[in-house]
Image (tube, grey):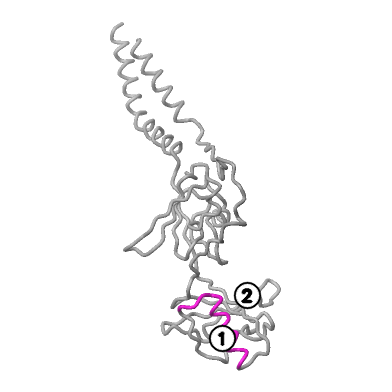
Amino acid sequence: MRLYTFIILFFGILFTLTSCSNKQYQSLFEQKSVVTDTSLHKPAVSTIPYRIKSQDILQIRNLQNVKYIVDEAPSGGASAVATSGGGITGGQTYQVEDDSTVTLPVIGHVQVVGLTRAEAAKKIEGLYRKSLLKDPIIELKITNLKVTLLGEIKAQGNFPLVKDRTTLVEMIGAAGGLTEKANETNIQIIRGDQLNPQVTSINLRDIQSINDPRAVLQNGDIIYIAQNKRAIRNENLQSLSVISQPALLLLNTALIIFTLSRR
């Protein structure tokens, strides 16, 4: 009977541990020491701007007059973004061809591959000024740039890079934040091609991660948030309890039969 009591007590403690809350006591952006303001003395960290490639999708509009570049009834491969009121606000989109050019109304083929967003906008603006428009102000966006979020994040999937210098913190916020199981000390950013992937680890518990230039996202980045140790331990205990339940039932039955046979 002592053995039976011990076994029941052991598994009772085990089930209690496995039923513990998975609540993660996350702590983000801790300031471990007094940090002086050095922003006036340190030069801004520059990142390599994205350069346009073949098959990119460019959204182009003239801020001076939406009648140009953006048409009320777009044709061909171009598309317009309409508001609920029927107006055109987003501009038409044009795909960069394999010959490194994008075909635009009136001015035709424009070489854009290898240019940054700002350089391409300035070039297109100059061409329209020479041939058609008086004082064009060209806005150009690259709409197909994206990153992928996986793991312990509220919303997994692909998210567009809607502006230059989008940071890791901004993207996590756009995805709804980390889950309670997330390991905030080791956020992995995977970038590069399949033959030479580069993995960067960001510790969001450290407040200095906000200014980390490595956390400025690039097109094609994969962001993976792994589980923390508490969540892994709880899952292992739960798996152990599931495995041990049939054994406990069998042992309990055997002990009952043994006890009855001794009477």
Observer-nearest of 49 and 162: 49
Which residue is located at x 58 percent, y 79 percent?
A: 60
Observer-nearest of 180 and 184: 184
Residue 37 vertical placement versus 258 (above, below): below
Q: Amino acid at mark 2?
A: Gly
Per the rendering, the mark at residue 90 is 2
Mark 2 Cα-neighbour bin, 10 Å: few <14, some 14–19, many ≥20: some
Q: How many marks?
A: 2
Q: CA distance from mark 1 to mark 2?
A: 16 Å
User: From the viewer's perspective, is 76 left or right of 227?
Assistant: right
Q: Is residue 79 magenta?
A: no
Q: Amino acid at mark 1?
A: Ser
Labels 1 and 2: the sequence-earlier one: 1
Per the rendering, the mark at residue 260 is none
State the image quarter where residue 195 is shown: bottom left
> For the residue labelled by badge 2, is the local secondary structure a helix, a strand or a loop?
strand
Observer-nearest of 240 and 36: 36
Magenta-drawn stretch, dominant element (helix, strand or loop): helix
Which residue is located at x 52 percent, y 47 percent?
A: 204
> For the residue labelled by badge 1, is the local secondary structure a helix, a strand or a loop?
loop
Q: Farthest residue in the bottom direction?
A: 131
Q: Farthest residue in the right direction?
A: 85
Q: Is residue 124 magenta?
A: yes
Residue 192 location, x and y as percent?
Answer: 39, 63
Which residue is located at x 56 percent, y 86 percent?
A: 75
Which residue lies under the disc numbered 1?
Answer: 75
User: From the viewer's perspective, is 96 left or right of 3?
Assistant: right
State the image quarter where residue 249 is shown: top left
| Quarter of the C terminus within the rendering | top left
Q: State if disc 2 and disc 1 touch (CB < 8 Å).
A: no
User: From the viewer's perspective, is 227 left or right of 162?
Assistant: left
The span picked out in magenta is 114-130
